[in-house]
Image (cartoon, rainbow, N blue to C red):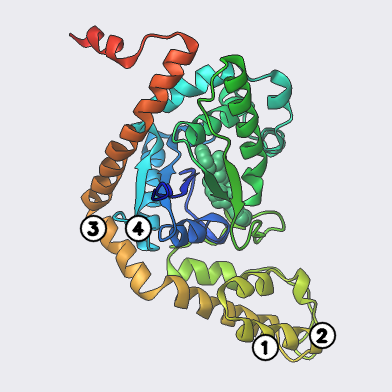
């Protein structure tokens, strides 16, 4: 008897369109997302419902949603290999998040770091912001995802998601959901230009992947340093210039900067120029051209998002049927009669 063919691993991840995508998003998550498209079944979405917790401006939300999808495509996401879609085009996700909320204890929700961190940063403490991990759990579970490639800040949310899947299966005595695992990318926590984690919520902290060259130059040349002169030894481990350069350069190139910092002989201005050149080499040229084409032909991006949503909705349907049956809610067949 021939062995059963192995199912490919299903990877799922999302990125919020609450600002321009930045180097933290790229090295923490997107680079890995694109690499994985050759290794398994990949589902990636733009989490526009999540962004509503911090961005309440219709025009900007639509713009950043488009920008995020266009950035992924310009960075190498191939729609023949991976599906890209908008979270809101799969409305069953919000339906499932409600059902999950009914089996999720307040204690679990109250332990979420990101809620406390965001409130501490001045973001309005709305019910949606608090409920955010439940919507994220629904995002993950509805596709029966195996692995969730994210940056470090999202790992707790994946743990919460596993707990919610367990509560659901236990409460309704049925193994509807599998327990997903988080996977980290090359740089789980990229530091920003202002000292903390690089994050869309602090514009001054980010280097946008596809910013205008003049803007990127201004940001890099403006990185604050101490006043050590060219000849003085410097600490590369505490320099954001070196940390970012390490992500972009080859090991040998990085060693040159690292040694020059430790021994003295490289000024901060020269190090910034090297960083700037690497940024241009990585994200300029072909990638920037491709990104510009998306702005000229937005319908190409829209087509990819619609095709992606159509395909993932087929994945969602059987899981939602199992959910309806497990909890005792009429199936979608019965709901369809409402439209007759
Ligand atoms: P932001 O924090 O900028 O709003 P998102 O929350 O949309 O970004 O995150 C999208 C993905 O990028 C997630 O997987 C997240 O873990 C990752 N990510 C965000 N910022 C960083 C960072 N500074 N370093 C590493 N990964 C990051
Ligand atoms: N909360 C994630 C972030 O801020 C984005 C996201 C929403 C997500 N739903 C998800 C990531 C599901 C992975 C899986 O980065």
Q: Secondary structure at mark 3?
A: helix
Q: Find residue 64 and report its horizontal and vertical position in percent.
A: 41, 46
Q: Quadrant of residue 76?
A: bottom left
- In this rendering, which labeled residue sits more in front, label 1 or label 2? 1
Q: Nearer the viewer, residue 80 or 228?
A: 80
Q: Residue at x 62, y 44 (%)?
A: 154
Tell me the distance, in whole angstroms, between the alpha carbons under discs 3 and 2: 48 Å
Q: Secondary structure at mark 1?
A: helix
For residue 73, which numbered disc appears in the image? 4
Residue located beneath label 1 in the image: 256
Q: Which of marks 2 and 4 precedes in the sequence? A: 4
Q: Find residue 47 and report its horizontal and vertical position in percent.
A: 45, 39
For residue 9, above or below residue 285: above
Residue located beneath label 2 in the image: 233
Which class describes the residues within 10 Å of circle 3: few (<14), some (14-19), or many (20+)? few
Which class describes the residues within 10 Å of circle 4: few (<14), some (14-19), or many (20+)? many
Q: Is residue 308 left or right of residue 199?
A: left
Q: Nearer the viewer, residue 16 or 36?
A: 36
Residue 87 seen = yes
């Amino acid at each position: 008897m021939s062995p059963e063919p192995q199912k490919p691993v299903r990877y799922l991840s999302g990125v919020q369109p609450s600002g321009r995508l930045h180097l933290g998003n790229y090295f923490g998550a997107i680079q890995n997302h694109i690499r994985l498209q050759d290794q398994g079944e990949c589902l990636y979405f733009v989490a526009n419902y999540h962004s509503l917790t911090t961005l309440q401006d219709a025009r900007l939300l639509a713009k950043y949603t488009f920008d995020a999808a266009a950035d992924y495509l310009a960075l190498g996401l191939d729609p023949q290999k991976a599906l890209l879609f908008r979270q809101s085009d799969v409305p069953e996700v919000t339906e499932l998040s409600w059902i999950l909320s009914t089996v999720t204890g307040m204690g679990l929700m109250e332990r979420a770091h990101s809620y406390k961190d965001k409130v501490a940063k001045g973001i309005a403490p709305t019910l949606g912001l608090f409920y955010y991990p439940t919507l994220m759990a629904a995002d993950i579970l509805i596709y029966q995802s195996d692995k969730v490639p994210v940056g470090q800040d999202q790992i707790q949310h994946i743990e919460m998601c596993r707990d919610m899947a367990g509560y659901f299966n236990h409460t309704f005595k049925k193994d509807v959901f599998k327990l997903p695992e988080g996977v980290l990318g090359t740089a789980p926590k990229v530091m920003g230009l202002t000292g903390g984690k690089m994050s869309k919520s602090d514009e001054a902290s980010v280097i946008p992947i596809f910013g205008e060259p003049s803007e990127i130059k201004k940001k890099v040349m403006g990185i604050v340093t101490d006043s050590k002169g060219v000849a003085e030894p410097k600490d590369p481990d505490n320099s954001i210039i070196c940390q970012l350069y390490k992500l972009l350069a080859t090991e040998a190139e990085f060693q040159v900067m690292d040694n020059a910092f430790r021994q003295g002989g490289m000024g901060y201005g020269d190090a910034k120029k090297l960083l700037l050149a690497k940024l241009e080499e990585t994200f300029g040229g072909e990638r920037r051209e491709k990104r510009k084409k998306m702005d000229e032909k937005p319908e190409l991006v829209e087509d990819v998002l619609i095709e992606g949503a159509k395909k993932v909705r087929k994945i969602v349907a059987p899981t939602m049927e199992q959910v309806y049956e497990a909890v005792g809610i009429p199936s979608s067949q019965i709901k369809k009669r409402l439209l007759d």
